[in-house]
Image (spheres, rainbow, N blue to C red):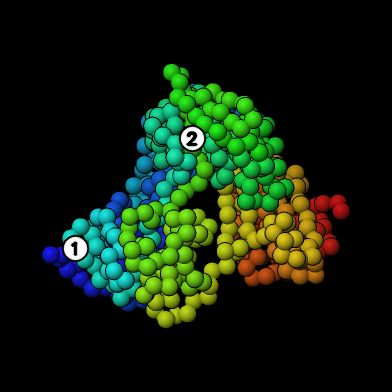
Amino acid sequence: MSENGGTFDLVILGAGSGGYAAAIRASELGMKVALIEKNKLGGTCLHVGCIPTKALLHSAEVADAARDSETFGVKASFEGIDMAGVNAYKDKVVSRMFKGLSGLIKAHGITVVEGEGRLTGRDEVTVGDTVYKGTNILLASGSTPKTLGLEIDGEKVITSEHALEMQHVPKSVVVLGGGVIGVEFASVYRSYGAEVTIVEALPHLLPLEDESTSKQLERAFRKRGIKYELNTPFESVKTTDTGVSVSLQGGKSLEAEVMLVAIGRAPVSEGLGYEDNGVEMERGFVKVDENLHTGVGNIYAVGDLIPTLQLAHVGFAEGIYVAEQIAGLNPPAIDYDGVPRITYSEPEVASVGLTSAQAQERGYETVEIDYNLGGNGKSQILQTQGSVKVIAQKDGPVLGVHMIGSRVGELTAEGQLIYNWEALPSEVAQLVHPHPTQSEAIGEAHLALAGKPLHVHE
């Protein structure tokens, strides 16, 4: 007979970004919450995603700074990458954040259940033999790297999760997939000294970004010695004595020490009892309405498990939204176009709002400006190249902000305010941006759109 784990206002399956954000917000709103997690609080983002990958990318930036130090009049010698040291630094960051999160969850009085949960009814999740009843249920079981059905041996054919545990720097890497994950790891491997080739079936790297940004990234990568095969589907891989032999459509083959499979992430939903209880699925994703409700009982779903943007900050927003929805606060729906997107490669790529192609598809008449960072003092100090492109509706608000260059990720904070508050270029042009900062590039682009360019000749 099953044990009774108790009755809760909200039972959450999965403690990643979506699950734990919902748990904290629900507890703030006076709900009794159970949070079920088979691994560790924090999920993909904290343990095998955003945080550890950005730590590697920062160590890569330090490596590049050491290598290029003479450009800045500093004599330093680059002696190589100490992977044990890099991993110790990365793990220290993760462990500190994990402790902080665990303390936060505990302080909120949330019941944490360690173990593998399954949906066993419209109002219950079972872990082992214990049943946790919930007036509301939130499915937040997250995602796992896609593998194309390839045999992943963890040594020669690896996923991003293996790449985070690198014990040495491979001499050469084929990165399968030119999306965010592939581009970030290609950037890290190159900074660490590896020969890198990216294979992408679509015509551009970062195919979801504005095409002008993708083309600039391709140029920057070519300069860095990162090779890529675009418009070229992958066919097969076989392991050899020295590594891998990768066959591409069209007959070309590539040899390398390692192949990183970085073709995105698939939802973790199989065998968790979702369909058995009437939850509708599509390609492994849970289908939800605009309120993130599954249409079954009081069951909601968030994060990588549903077909929205697979970003930690989207998970946070969705988790908070569901908690507030359950509490009857009637929160405004999330505008996914208004969510900032950043690729932390060198150079960084950051955007918010619509691309030129999307604006056209939606029937907008637009005006655009592409402000080159060559005119931006701070970017010259950093010795970075790139641009800020702003797309606005003709005689209307800004529809998209697209940026490329070192450190431009931080600029999306302002970009999202401009987009989400439906600012007119003339309104942004009135704001005074501090000098010398890269944020001035956003100011300059809007000045130009408002018809009064300062440091750019029209």
Q: Note whether 364 is above or below 101 in the view shown.
A: below
Identify the residue at horizontal 42%, vertical 81% (top origin): 328
Residue in the picture at 66% in, 47% down = 404
Q: Secondary structure at mark 1?
A: strand
- Residue 176 screen position, x and y as percent: 54, 36
Which amino acid lies under the numbered mark 2 shown in the image of this protein? Leu
Image mark for residue 260 = 2
Place residue 273 in its image quadrant.
Answer: bottom left
- Residue 446: percent from the left, percent from the top? 75, 61
Viewer-proximal residue, 283 or 442? 283
| Quadrant showing the N terminus | bottom left
Q: Is residue 242 above or below residue 180?
A: above
**Residue 34 visible in the snapshot:** no
Of residues 120 and 352, the one nearer the viewer is: 120
Q: Amino acid at mark 1?
A: Thr
Q: Residues within 10 Å of mark 2 (few under 14, many from 20)?
A: many
